[in-house]
Image: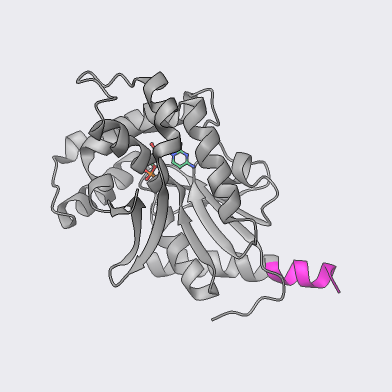
């Protein structure tokens, strides 16, 4: 484990299925930092909306009902023998929030102002003491614009769809590769063009295109960057 004199905030943003969560989790564990998957929080709100009939068959979200229900939605993270799991009002929903049905509905839910406001506030509370690695779409731009380390992860849509396809098979919720690719492309479009906190690289984020990188290579890249930033901070602080 690396010991840091000054705990920092690490913001890892990027496209869906770019592998950012895997990298972020490993970095947090190596550093002894807390890891927060902000996408899981948007997924949990989406699951709640689906379970409470707030999303029509054609995918239209009842924004008013969901905005009013936000006060009844509690999202926590629990450490289990299988890793960190997302809890929705105390129930472990880790498996359910990764299904293609939730993936298909999450982008419109994540575009709703009241949803973003509530989740951003909770994410900022998680990071109040620093020592946190958070991944998402707007962590370096909106949630923690002051983060000391910002990374923007990207990879080709085909590579990302392939990764998600394998993940869904492993989770026991298989889907065709074509459907997964279509979902990845559609989510990129919605994430990049929404008015509320669109997906974009923060000016001071470092880009990582991991299309052709192995997991160990990505992990080393991330740890090297962390070590450089930490060294700079320590030098500045004397
Ligand atoms: O990273 P993911 O695929 O689990 O994210 C699920 C969705 O949540 C994705 O479509 C974009 C949205 N999201 C967001 O808008 N802002 C974040 N900080 C994280 C995720």
34 relative to 75, above or below = below
Quadrant location, ligand no. 1: top left
Image coordinates for residue 114, horizontal then vertical, percent: 50, 28
- The span picked out in magenta is 230-238
Q: Main secondary structure of the magenta part?
A: helix
Q: Residue furthest right?
A: 238
Image coordinates for residue 17, horizontal then vertical, percent: 35, 47
67 relative to 136, above or below = above
Nearest the eye: 21 or 42: 42
Look at the image and name its color scheme: one colour
Decide if residue 2 is on the left or right side of residue 95.
Answer: right
Examine the rendering and report whether any part of residue 214 can be seen: no
Quarter that holds the N terminus: bottom right
Image coordinates for residue 63, horizontal then vertical, percent: 40, 21
26 relative to 157, above or below = below
Image quadrant in which you'd find residue 130: bottom right
**Magenta stretch: residue 76 in it?**
no
Nearest the eye: 212 or 71: 71
Decide if residue 229 is on the left or right side of residue 222.
Answer: right
**Residue drawn at 46 percent across, 26 percent down:** 112
Nearest the eye: 202 or 1: 1
**Residue drawn at 70 percent across, 49 percent down:** 146
Image quadrant in which you'd find residue 76: bottom left
Q: How many marks?
A: 0
Image coordinates for residue 218, horizontal then vertical, percent: 45, 63
């Amino acid at each position: 484990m690396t010991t840091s004199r000054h705990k920092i905030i690490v913001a890892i943003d990027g496209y869906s299925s770019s592998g950012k969560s895997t990298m972020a989790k490993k970095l947090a564990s190596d550093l002894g930092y807390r890891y927060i998957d902000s996408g899981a929080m948007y997924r949990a709100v989406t699951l709640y909306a689906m379970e409470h009939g707030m999303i029509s068959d054609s995918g239209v979200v009842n924004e008013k009902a969901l905005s009013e229900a936000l006060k009844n939605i509690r999202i926590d993270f629990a450490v289990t023998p299988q890793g960190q799991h997302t809890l929705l009002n105390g129930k472990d929903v880790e498996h359910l929030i990764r299904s293609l049905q939730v993936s298909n509905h999450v982008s419109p839910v994540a575009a709703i102002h009241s949803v973003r406001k509530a989740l951003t506030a909770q994410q900022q509370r998680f990071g109040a003491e620093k020592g946190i690695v958070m991944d998402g779409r707007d962590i370096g731009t909106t949630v923690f614009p002051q983060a000391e380390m910002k990374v923007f992860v990207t990879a080709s849509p085909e590579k990302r769809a392939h990764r998600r396809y394998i993940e869904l098979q492993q989770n026991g919720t298989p889907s065709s590769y074509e459907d997964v690719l279509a979902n990845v492309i559609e989510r990129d479009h919605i994430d990049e063009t929404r008015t509320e906190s669109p997906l974009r690289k923060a000016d001071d984020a470092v880009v990582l295109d991991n299309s052709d990188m192995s997991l160990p290579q990505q992990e080393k890249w991330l740890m090297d960057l962390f070590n450089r930033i930490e060294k700079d901070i320590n030098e500045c602080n004397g």
